[in-house]
Image: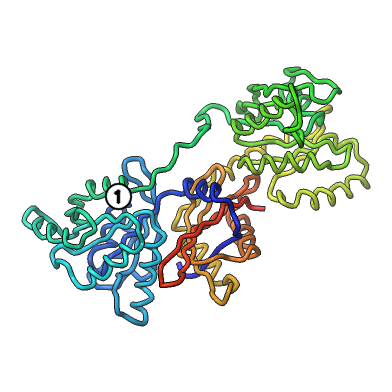
């Protein structure tokens, strides 16, 4: 990729660690020109995507691909030939390869075993050691047992065991990939793994007494939960299977979320804790608000809690039929102002009491879930990002223009994008990228996470690693 990105600073270390853990491991394929890097990339990804030609220097840019081995997913980055003591275009290509190595979790160093160790290989090795990344050495072009002795010489590079392979024929690549996967950084198992299969799960949330239980009963067509005018009647999260729009959904009716729940005692405290648990089990949250009253700070807090939980979001405005035209006009303005952070969330104006427009909830929920599940292929994402930053480059920061090395979608549910950069981007530019992501790819009803892995050159030419906490799209 050619240009740039980045974000806000001053983030807690523990959040940085969480962001790193969520990212798929990155493997950079490096080596001097014409040693077979792109052939090996094609072999690993199982299709001919990287351009291969028997001419040095065909690959110039870093190109990222989705790859997997033994059920382990990772991002594979093909680089141009890495040469030292060069200038012009060759120097730019070498810098691209060096950036890739600095941002990778594992470096796959490809050497031509039939040629042996060259001065360029030794120079590249010195740079790789400085990155302090694990290096897996691929001794390429070992097409048979007779050439395996050539690979043994490569022990002298001092980066560990050389794995004799033939990228062209696939010989030995399985053992090589086993070593690559074994070198990946350890990541903790996700806590509270979501339930797989079964009906999609919807949490009905909102401040106390906005009509959540009434809405659930309306959707079910019968009285499934207790409804009372006293705020806080519901204290347990109640799961109900309800058929709507020709499919079965699991609705979780929750106790009302209160703002200062740490100050609460007894049943109210535990009701709030159970609400948080219900959000963790849900895939999409319908936030219900009572429009017969002005939007309250508690309503905003509920929306923020849903967004922070990473669940898809639908906004439902209850008792809309009780408003006159003038109140509706000013309420729309109020909603646009106070809920601007979630302008991407579908809105449905309903009446839980009469059933007005409740049928519109299902299409809104389906839209949010589809966005929540969306995954953009790495190649398409990087092509889009390259065009975006070429048309609108990021602002210069501290006399330097940050550059984007490449981007990948680390996860879905919700979509989480990671930008590998050489420096920080201004907050406005980060929001610009977020906005364009939504405009071009949708994501209606789903929060979107954007985080950075940053490599900045500091004193002495050494690369230092920085990272920015994932931030929810606004």
Task: Give the percent coordinates (x, y) of residue 35.
Answer: 22, 66
Task: Give the percent coordinates (x, y) of residue 56.
Answer: 25, 73
Name the element at disc 1: helix
Image mark count: 1
Seen in the image, is 72 located left or right of residue 367? left
Seen in the image, is 474 located left or right of residue 300? left
Query: What scheme was used to colour the molecule?
Result: rainbow
Considering every residue shown, the one lying at the far front of the view is: 459
Considering every residue shown, the one lying at the far bottom of the view is: 88
Which class describes the residues within 10 Å of circle 1: few (<14), some (14-19), or many (20+)? Answer: many
Q: Give residue 135's quadrant in the image.
A: bottom left
Task: Give the percent coordinates (x, y) of residue 94.
Answer: 34, 72
Task: Give the percent coordinates (x, y) of residue 434.
Answer: 61, 57
Q: Quadrant of the N terminus?
A: bottom left
Considering every residue shown, the one lying at the far left of the view is: 146
Residue nearer the viewer, 135 or 308:
135
Up-down relation of residue 255 to residue 50 (above or below): above
Residue nearer the viewer, 55 or 427:
427
Seen in the image, is 132 located left or right of residue 447? left
Q: Going 52% across and 29% down the picture, which residue do you hit?
A: 195
Report which residue position mark 1 lands on.
180
Up-down relation of residue 307 to residue 217 (above or below): below
Q: Going 64% across and 60% down the picture, which residue do you hit?
A: 431
């Amino acid at each position: 990729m050619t240009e740039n990105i980045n974000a806000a600073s001053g983030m807690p270390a523990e959040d940085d660690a969480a962001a790193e853990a969520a990212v798929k491991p990155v493997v950079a394929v490096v080596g001097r020109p014409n040693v077979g890097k792109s052939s090996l990339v094609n072999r690993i990804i199982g299709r001919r995507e990287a351009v291969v030609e028997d001419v040095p220097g065909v690959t110039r840019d870093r190109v990222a691909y989705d790859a997997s081995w033994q059920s382990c997913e990772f991002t594979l980055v093909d680089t141009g030939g890495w040469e030292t003591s060069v200038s012009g275009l060759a120097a730019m290509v070498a810098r691209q390869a060096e950036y890739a190595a600095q941002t990778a979790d594992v470096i796959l160093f490809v050497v031509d075993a039939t040629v042996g160790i060259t001065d360029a290989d030794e120079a590249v090795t010195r740079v790789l050691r400085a990155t302090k990344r694990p290096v897996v050495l691929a001794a390429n072009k070992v097409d048979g047992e007779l050439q395996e002795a050539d690979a043994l010489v490569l022990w002298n590079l001092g980066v560990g065991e050389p794995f004799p392979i033939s990228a062209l024929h696939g010989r030995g690549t399985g053992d090589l990939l086993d070593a690559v996967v074994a070198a990946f950084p350890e990541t903790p198992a996700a806590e509270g793994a979501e339930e797989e299969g079964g009906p999609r799960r919807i949490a009905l949330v909102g401040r106390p007494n906005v009509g959540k239980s009434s809405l659930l009963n309306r959707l079910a067509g019968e009285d499934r939960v207790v409804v009372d005018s006293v705020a806080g009647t519901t204290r347990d999260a109640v799961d109900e299977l309800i058929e709507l729009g020709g499919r079965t959904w699991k609705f979780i009716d929750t106790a009302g979320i209160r703002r200062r729940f740490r100050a609460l005692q007894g049943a109210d405290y535990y009701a709030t804790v159970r609400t948080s648990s219900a959000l963790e089990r849900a895939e999409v949250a319908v936030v219900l608000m009572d429009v017969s009253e002005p939007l309250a700070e508690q309503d905003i807090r509920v929306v923020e809690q849903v967004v922070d939980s990473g669940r898809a979001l639908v906004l439902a405005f209850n008792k809309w039929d009780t408003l006159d035209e003038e109140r509706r006009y000013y309420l729309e303005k109020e909603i646009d102002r106070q809920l601007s952070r979630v302008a991407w969330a579908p809105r449905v104006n309903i009446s839980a009491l009469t059933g007005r427009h409740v049928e519109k909830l299902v299409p809104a929920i389906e839209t949010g879930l589809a966005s929540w599940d969306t995954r953009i292929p790495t190649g398409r994402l990087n092509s889009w990002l390259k065009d975006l930053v070429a048309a609108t480059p990021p602002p210069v920061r501290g006399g330097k223009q940050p550059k984007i090395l490449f981007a990948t979608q680390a996860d879905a549910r919700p979509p989480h994008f990671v930008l590998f950069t050489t420096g920080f981007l201004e907050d406005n530019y980060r929001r610009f990228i977020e906005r364009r992501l939504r405009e071009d790819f949708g994501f209606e009803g789903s929060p979107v996470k954007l985080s950075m892995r940053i490599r900045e050159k500091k004193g002495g030419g050494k690369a230092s690693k920085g990272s920015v906490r994932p931030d929810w799209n606004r």
